[in-house]
Image (cartoon, rainbow, N blue to C red):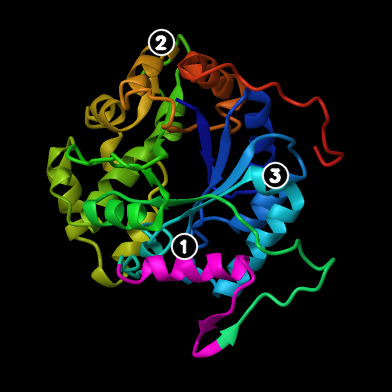
Amino acid sequence: MKISAAFPPVPETPDHIALAEELGYETAWVYDTPALQLDVWMTLALAGVRTDRIRLGTGVLIPSLRHPMTTAAAIATLVGLVGPERVIIGAGTGFTGRRAMGQKPLRWADFPGMVADIQALLRGEIVEVDGRAARMLHWPGQAIERPIEVPWIVAVNGPRGLAAAAEMGCGVFTSRPRPDADYAGIDDVILLGFGTIMDDDETIESPRVLDTAGPGVSVAYHAFLEQRDARLETLPNADRFADITDDMDPATLHLSLHDFRGVPGPFRDDGHNRLNIWHIAHAGRVGPIRRRSAALFEDDGDQEPVTFVCLNRAGGKQKGQGYAQGQRDQRSGPEEPRSEKRSQHA
């Protein structure tokens, strides 16, 4: 088992990724949600000049948000900056990246072809885009030489996504694995979780815990609502959440759902805080968090759960270090030595 960290692309993220490298995290995944945060590629590039070792990935890229040539050029830029061994591309159909703009996720019938076009461009091949031939025409010195080969991971939750990932030869990235999901034949399985490490004097109801672990709770509720997933009914206070959303304007419902900051207000003061945070997010002391994370997947050395760590002013370095130290003995094999060289931009 390897431990990584996921980040929204906000102004502090490049520095937080540098801190994640200090703490020994494997990969820094950055979201691609331009309606909510900043640009994923600029954030990854800024992180690249601040770090030496940590792998950098999109978590996850939405192909429809950009022309395939623009995406290919962005990947080439990052690979040229940090090297292919430090780049991994996660791609998805747009649970947040598209839904936050009122659009449905991409169809699984279309998604593999969109990824294949980007991969073909990176190999230097000609692909048809908007009815015309396109190819990366960069001269020597304008970009690294093609072919550019980097690993790809596909964000999935259901059986169609798993089947598509297997056919594409990609690993999978999931945040809400279904009980009957079969990951046999998938080389890399990455689990995204949300949470925070609590101080000795904190409880589940503490404001900082709600502010840091709470967004994961909101994501679970609106994800199941938008996907019409029956698992919504299994969440605490689901009926009340449904009543709240039923009263919202359908034309702007997607804006309201994605504008929740932390746990929605009605969930803060009605006695459900502990149940919500505990069942949906990882919030607790180091020992229980370690055991709970280890139980999510059998450790066969090939699976990489990704842990969300909130390295903000309220949490700071100590929270991230606690998460890293609490789970480090779950790694397979010894930790790689970290370079002492630091970028002038650090």
Find the distance from the CA under tag 3 to the CA under tag 1.
20 Å
Q: Label 1 amino acid? A: Ile
Q: Label 2 amino acid? A: Gly
What residue sits 58% from the left and 50% below the top?
9
Secondary structure state at the residue bearing disc 1: loop
For marks 3 and 1, the one nearer the N-term is: 3
Q: Position of residue 88 (x, y in %)?
A: 56, 48
Q: Are marks 1 and 2 in contact (CB under 8 Å)?
A: no
- Residue interval drawn in magenta: 109-132
What residue sits 32% from the left and 39% below the top?
217
Of residues 256 and 303, the one drawn nearer to the viewer in this rendering: 303
Picture layout, residue 299 above or below residue 75: above
Residue at numbered disc 2: 287
Of residues 114 and 99, the one drawn nearer to the viewer in this rendering: 114
Looking at the rendered image, the quarter that the C terminus falls into is top right
Secondary structure state at the residue bearing disc 2: helix
Residue at numbered disc 1: 62
For marks 3 and 2, the one nearer the N-term is: 3
Q: Residues within 10 Å of mark 1 (few under 14, many from 20)?
A: many
Q: Residues within 10 Å of mark 3 (few under 14, many from 20)?
A: many
Of residues 53 and 256, the one drawn nearer to the viewer in this rendering: 53
Find the distance from the CA under tag 3 to the CA under tag 2.
30 Å
Given the current orientation, which residue lies at the most extreme right position?
A: 344
Q: Label 3 amino acid? A: Ala
On screen, residue 330 versus residue 27, left or right, reads left
Could one spot residue 264 in this view of the protein? no
Q: Position of residue 178 (x, y in %)?
A: 22, 41
For marks 1 and 2, the one nearer the N-term is: 1
Secondary structure state at the residue bearing disc 3: helix
Q: Position of residue 24 (x, y in %)?
A: 62, 24
Looking at the rendered image, the quarter that the N terminus falls into is top left
